[in-house]
């Protein structure tokens, strides 16, 4: 059924408004990152300004951002890989043996406020002299990734027919062999979805890194505060820093849009 | 003939499988695969959750301060009494948490539903709209907070410039004692409405067309079709969206911290329970009280979740 013309006109204009409302602030942030602070303070130069790379020079050279980018990449990558190793088999088991209560234990991690875990973690890990190191950061980020991965993969395995596994068993493979050689290769799209989402959430995580990272292990969301002084803000530098934090993750999301969307909506339609 | 006598060595696949089944370890592993697979993940989460929650529960009954070590004294439910009668910081924080969550959920669901309905049927340029919807969702919340901080700056921000063009005077936005909380709500709505859109859109696309068609043939208007056909069918998905967003909205931290800093601003104007508990823990090291606040906060979240899933089950029947 084809929508009527007045509706199409209404829909198109409404969508233009939606796209503008969602995109304009981001574009404004990127534009400001190319302005000098003088231009940012001059409202007459809101749109007409000569772009400068000075802020990016500050961010990447003086503010040590290359190191922080490396930290963020390493923490997100390690937390994602380890969470996949723990989470994918767990999700498989929970899906095939419908372990509802066990799944609930893992999903509790989604519900609990992070602050309530941080005080005891901070106490224990600082006694172990681990605060400020990568291990504790990766562990805390795994705490975010693992429930996400279990949740997504459980849904994925629920939707995977068991017939192929059964056929593999008849052909002489063991249960674990069937999982490894049949189910796992079939679930590559699911694993990709879970991995990408986990990477994004770890990259964006702020509170755990705020408390548990040290000056050498600072991740990007924490490093962004270096541009906020007590008295004044280096707006140009701040916007360049914000752009450096968000742009990579946005680009990844754009290239793998399908996976991000299916991950974010996983389990939503089962009711 | 030798193939008949030793069939196992003949096929290239069989040896591996037969070794697998005969090894004692792999037989054990196969029999216990249910827990072998699930236990490591569960143990990880349990160790990182159970001990901290139990300890938070214990700390809430002590006067731990400055340091969480053993010198603190057991004081029973004194903290709970103090916190629950604290009309200075605690109850305002509860009220802000409830208000923040309620308002953002209301707007995110209404706007999310409207946008999802707009996107429901295929149209030209769909790809671009989907990009626009995805980008705020994956943007780092702290960076989003900084971005809006510039836009809402009272002196140099674009928001006041836009208002100026249509003849409205400058607003204090994040800087105002009363406008800060609504402004942070706006930022949350900007970032997370797309999440509701995606969930509802997934729900809409999974609906079958037949009830719609039947209602159309019966002469129902498009509003009637939405109200009496689409909405009831979509209700379980709406509740999933409310549940997912609700839990996160109750725990909002990044945007509030990025825009107003410690303590939710100098007048605590955006101090929600989460921000309050964080401040008590890491700015004041007031562990006994912060643990009490956290336990109460936790009970509120569990209560809200229970209420929503209970309702979900009721609707499912």
Image (tube, coloured by chain):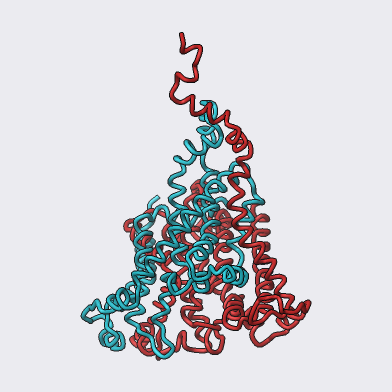
Chain colours: A cyan, B red
The outermost residue toward the left is A50
Instruction: Name which quarter of the figure residue A16 lies in.
Output: bottom left
- Left or right, A226 with respect to A180, comes to left
Where's residue A99, x and y in %? Answer: 64, 47
Q: In this view of the protein, which residue sits in the foreground, A39 or A224?
A: A224
- Left or right, A208 with respect to B167, comes to right
> Count of labels shown?
0
- Residue pictured at 72% horizontal, 79% vertical: B72
Q: In this view of the protein, which residue sits in the foreground, B273 or B209?
A: B273
Instruction: Name which quarter of the figure residue A35 lies in.
Output: bottom left
- Residue pictured at 51% horizontal, 28% vertical: B17
- Left or right, A118 with respect to A33, comes to right
The outermost residue toward the top is B1
Q: Is residue A62 above or below residue B25?
A: below
Instruction: Name which quarter of the figure residue A169 lies in.
Output: top right
Where's residue B85, x and y in %? Answer: 73, 84
Q: Is residue A214 above or below residue A265?
A: below
Asked whether residue B250 is in view, the answer is: no
Asked whether residue A244 is in view, the answer is: yes
- Residue pictured at 66% horizontal, 64% vertical: B51
- Residue pictured at 51% horizontal, 12% vertical: B5
Q: In this view of the protein, which residue sits in the foreground, B309 or B113?
A: B309
Where's residue A115, x and y in %? Answer: 59, 72
Q: In this view of the protein, which residue sits in the foreground, A108 or A14?
A: A108
Where's residue A117, x and y in %? Answer: 61, 68
């Amino acid at each position: 059924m084809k929508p009527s013309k007045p509706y199409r006109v209404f829909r198109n204009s409404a969508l233009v408004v939606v796209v503008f409302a969602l995109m304009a602030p981001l574009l404004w942030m990127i534009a400001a990152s190319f302005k000098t602070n003088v231009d940012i303070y001059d409202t007459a130069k809101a749109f007409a300004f000569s772009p400068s790379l000075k802020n990016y020079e500050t961010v990447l050279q003086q503010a040590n951002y290359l190191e922080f980018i490396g930290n963020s990449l390493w923490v997100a990558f390690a937390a994602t890989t380890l969470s996949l190793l723990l989470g994918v088999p767990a999700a498989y088991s929970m899906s095939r043996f419908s372990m509802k209560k066990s799944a609930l234990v893992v999903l509790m991690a989604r519900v609990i406020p992070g602050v309530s875990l941080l005080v005891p973690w901070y106490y224990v890990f600082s006694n172990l002299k681990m605060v400020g190191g990568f291990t504790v950061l990766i562990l805390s980020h795994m705490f975010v990734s693992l429930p996400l991965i279990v949740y997504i993969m459980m849904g994925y395995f629920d939707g995977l027919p068991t017939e192929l596994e059964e056929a593999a068993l008849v052909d002489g493979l063991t249960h674990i062999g069937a999982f490894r050689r049949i189910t796992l290769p079939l679930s590559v799209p699911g694993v990709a979805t879970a991995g990408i989402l986990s990477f994004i959430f770890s990259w964006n995580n702020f509170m755990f890194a705020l408390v548990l990272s040290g000056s050498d292990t600072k991740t990007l969301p924490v490093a962004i505060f270096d541009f906020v002084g007590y008295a004044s803000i280096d707006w140009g530098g701040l916007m360049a820093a914000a752009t450096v934090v968000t742009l990579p993750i946005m680009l990844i999301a754009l290239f793998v849009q399908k996976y991000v969307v299916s991950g974010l909506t996983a389990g939503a339609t089962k009711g | 003939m030798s193939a008949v006598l030793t069939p196992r060595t003949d096929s290239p696949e069989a040896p591996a499988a037969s070794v697998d089944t005969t090894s004692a370890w792999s037989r054990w592993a196969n029999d216990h695969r249910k827990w072998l697979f699930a236990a490591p993940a569960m143990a990880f989460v349990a160790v990182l959750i159970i001990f901290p929650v139990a300890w938070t529960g214990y700390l809430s009954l002590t006067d731990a301060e400055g340091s969480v070590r053993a010198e603190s004294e057991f004081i029973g439910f004194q903290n709970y009494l103090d916190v629950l009668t604290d009309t200075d910081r605690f109850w305002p924080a509860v009220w802000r948490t409830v208000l923040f969550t309620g308002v953002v959920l209301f707007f995110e669901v209404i706007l999310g539903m409207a946008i999802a309905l707009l996107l429901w049927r295929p149209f030209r340029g769909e790809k671009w709209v989907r990009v626009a919807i995805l980008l705020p969702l994956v943007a780092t919340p702290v960076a989003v907070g900084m971005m809006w901080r510039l836009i809402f700056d009272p002196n140099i921000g674009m928001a006041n410039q836009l208002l100026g063009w249509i003849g409205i005077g400058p607003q204090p936005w994040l800087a105002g004692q009363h406008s800060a909380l609504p402004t942070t709500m706006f930022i949350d709505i900007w970032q997370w409405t797309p999440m509701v859109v995606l969930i509802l859109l997934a729900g809409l696309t999974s609906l079958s067309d037949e009830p719609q068609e039947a209602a159309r043939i019966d002469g129902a208007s498009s509003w009637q079709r939405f109200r009496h056909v689409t909405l009831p069918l979509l209700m379980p998905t709406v509740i999933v969206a409310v549940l997912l967003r609700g839990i996160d909205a109750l725990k909002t931290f990044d945007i509030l911290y990025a825009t107003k800093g410690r303590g939710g601003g100098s007048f605590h104007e955006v101090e929600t329970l989460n921000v309050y508990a964080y401040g008590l823990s890491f700015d004041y090291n007031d562990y006994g009280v912060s643990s009490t606040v956290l336990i109460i906060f936790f009970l509120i979240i569990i209560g809200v979740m229970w209420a929503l899933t209970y309702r979900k089950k009721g609707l499912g029947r």
